[in-house]
Amino acid sequence: MSRAAKPSSTRRPYLDPLESIGYLSRINYRIFAHALEKRTVKHGVTSGQWRFLRVLWEQDDITQRELSRRVGIKEATTVRTVASLVNSGFVTRARSKEDRRRIMIRLTAKARRLHNRLLPIVIEINERALQGVSKKDIETTRRVLRHTYENLTRTDAP
């Protein structure tokens, strides 16, 4: 009997990669990141850098710790990525005037100019990925993914 024909009571969806929400989320993330990087690398931006730039385009001049939190990446990874952003000329790092312990991350003019070039790329990739998917299914997917995110990031979760 094919996988599609098995009754749901006998399937073990968390063990079958193509039925596991975690696995499907992971492979979709990887393919989105790869498709994005193929296009942004022409502008000198890696997929890792993109995630940070996207946050900084929304709010510039934030602490490195806050940037890490908003991107959802461990602080050690943020340190490395911010260093690559500095080396690429996309951000500057400076100590806060109010609290010298805090490192503030600021976009450069070069990074600001990239905003209007790179946003259409991410829009195009998302639209290509969603071709043939109904608006209702897209909204359901967004709602489910937001909910799973909230479930897994709640501070009271085991």
Image (tube, rainbow, N blue to C red):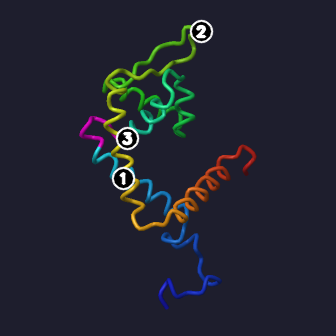
What is the spatial separation of the Cα atoms under label 1 and label 3, in whole angstroms? 10 Å
Check residue 94 in the rendering and tell me which mark sits there, or answer none: none
Residue 69 sits in quarter = top right
First in sequence: mark 3 vs mark 2 = 2
Q: What is the secondary structure assignment of the residue under circle 2?
A: loop
Q: Which residues are magenta?
A: 40-47
Question: Whole-percent x and y of residue 18?
Answer: 48, 71
Task: Tell me the chief SS of the magenta region.
Answer: helix
Q: Which residue is mark 1?
A: 125
Residue at the (42%, 61%) spot, across then down: 130
Residue at the (28%, 48%) spot, across then down: 38
Please tell me whether residue 50 is drawn above or below residue 24 in the rendered image.
Answer: above
Q: Which residue is mark 3?
A: 119
Residue at the (50%, 59%) spot, across then down: 25
Q: Which residue is mark 2?
A: 98
Query: Of the residues shown, which amino acid type is indicated by label 3?
Result: Leu
